[in-house]
Amino acid sequence: MNTILRKSVLGVAGLAFAGGVFAGPVAAHAAPVVESVPVAVAADKPSVDKGKLVPHGVQGAQSRVDLSDEQVANVKAIIAATKKAGMDERAAVVSIATALQESKLENLGHLGDRNDHDSQGLFQQRPSSGWGTVEQITDPEYSTTAFLKGLKQVDGWQEMPLTKAAQTVQVSAYPDHYAQWEQMAADLVTEHWNS
C-alpha cells in the first residue's frame, strides 16, 4: 500500500513539473496577470465607545425621524463644534438629542405666530435671553458652542441622565421630552463622529 501511494504522489509531482516546463515558455509570452488587492476603507477609523454614548441606558420610549441632507449637515456641524470645544462624544449626544427635540435638527428662523417667543436656530435659543443675536443663534457652530458652554457649567452633567443635563441648560417647559431622542442621537454620533 505504501508503494502505491508513493508512486501516485511521485506521478502527480512529475506531471506538475512537466506541465510547468512545457507551459513555462508559453506562459512567459502571455499577458501579465493583474491581481486586485482589497483596500481597507473604514477599518482604520477608530470606533466610538458606544457605552460612553448612553451610559445610563435610554429612558422611556424612543423617537426617530428621517433626516434630510440639511439635517445631516447640521448633525455634522454639531459634532465639529463639539470637537472644537474639546468635548467628547457624550456631549455630542446630549447636543444632538437637544436639537432633535427643539427643532428636529432644522435651523429654524423666526416662525411668526407659531414661534415660541423669539426662539430660533437648532436649539431654539432666544436673543432676548442672552444666547446671542439672531445671526449668531442661527449659525449651527455658534449655537452649538453656546449650548456646550452652558452644558460645561452644569456640575456633573456627564453623570446625569441626558434629559436632566439638557433641561438644565435649556430650561424647557417640557423637561422630559429630550429623553426620547437619546438613542437616535447616539446612533448619529456613532455614524458621523469619525467621518
Image (cartoon, rainbow, N blue to C red):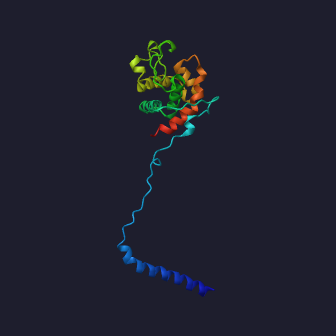
Quadrant containing the N terminus in the rendered view = bottom right
Is residue 159 at least partly visible in the picture? no
Quadrant containing the C terminus in the rendered view = top left
Residue sitting farthest toward the right? 60
Is residue 136 found left or right of 177 in the rendered image? left
Residue sitting farthest toward the left? 29
Q: Position of residue 18 (x, y in %)?
A: 45, 82
Q: Quadrant of residue 70?
A: top left
Between 32 and 41, the one lying in front of the other is: 32
Q: Quadrant of residue 173?
A: top right
Between 25 and 187, the one lying in front of the other is: 25
- 36 is higher (above) or lower (below) than 69: below
Between 179 and 122, the one lying in front of the other is: 122
Residue plotted at (43% across, 78% down): 20
- 106 is higher (above) or lower (below) than 194: above
Q: Position of residue 181 (x, y in %)?
A: 57, 29
Between 28 and 144, the one lying in front of the other is: 28
